[in-house]
Amino acid sequence: MLQIELICIGKLKEAFWKSACTEYSKRLSRFCRLRVTELKDEAIPETASAAQVEHAVMAEGERILERLLPRDYVISLCVEGKPLSSPGLAKQLQDICQSGAGRLVFVIGGSCGLSEEVKKRSQFRLSFSAMTFPHQLMRVILLEQVYRAFKINAGESYHK
C-alpha cells in the first residue's frame, strides 16, 4: 500500500478545516497510508522586508528538507507548477505507484511559498491554479483530489 505524506507549514486552526481533512483522511485509508506532518511556520511581520521574507522561507524550507528521505517522490505545490486535470493527477499517482518510490510526499509551503531548495528537491511541481489559496483550504483541496485520483484509478465512480 502506497505511503503518502503531506508536509505542511503551519497548523490547521479552524475546526471546519480539521473536520474536512479528517473526513478525507478516513476515506483515503482504504487506498493508502496517509500521514500529515505540520511544521512550524515562521512569524513574518506585515511590513517585512524582502530579506526577512527570504529568511523565513529558507528556514521553513530547511525544516521541510529535514523530513525528506532519499527515495521519496516529492510533489511541491506551487503556483508556477504544472496544472493537471483530475484524471491527469490520477495518472501521475498511478505512475508513481508503479515506479517503486519509497513514499509519495506532497509539500505545502507557508504563506510566502517554498524555498528554491525544496522546489529543486521535488520531482514534480504541481499547480492547482494561478490563484492563491489559504494554506488550510489548499490542504483540503489536495486531500480531496488525491482521494478522487484513487477513485478514478480504482475504476469507481465519483461525483463531478
Image (spheres, helix red, strand yellow):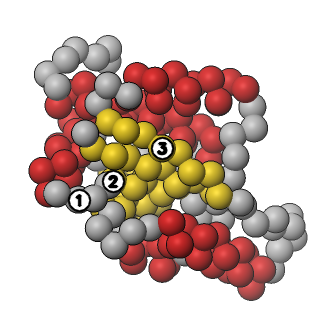
- Image point (68%, 52%), residue name: 10
Residue 140 lies, with reference to residue 84, above or below; the image says: above
Are there few (<14), some (14-19), or many (20+) residues within 10 Å of tag 3?
few
Are there few (<14), some (14-19), or many (20+) residues within 10 Å of tag 1?
some
- Image point (32%, 25%), residue name: 30
Q: Is disc 1 in contact with disc 3, using a CB cutoff of under 8 Å?
A: no
- Image point (22%, 15%), residue name: 157
- Tell me the number on the disc at residue 104: 2
User: At label 2, which amino acid type do we have?
Assistant: Leu
Are there few (<14), some (14-19), or many (20+) residues within 10 Å of tag 2?
many
Q: Is residue 90 left or right of 6 when viewed as pictured?
A: left
User: At label 1, which amino acid type do we have?
Assistant: Ala
Mark 3 or mark 2, earlier in chain: 3
Query: Mark 1 falls on what kind of element?
Result: loop
Tell which of 114 and 64 is nearer to you: 64
Residue 20 image position (x, y, % from top left): 57, 25
User: At label 3, which amino acid type do we have?
Assistant: Arg
Residue at label 1? 101
Q: Is disc 1 in contact with disc 2, using a CB cutoff of under 8 Å?
A: yes
Residue at label 3? 35
Q: Distance between the residues labelled 1 and 2?
A: 7 Å
Residue 98 image position (x, y, % from top left): 12, 50
In the picture, the quarter occupied by the C terminus is top left
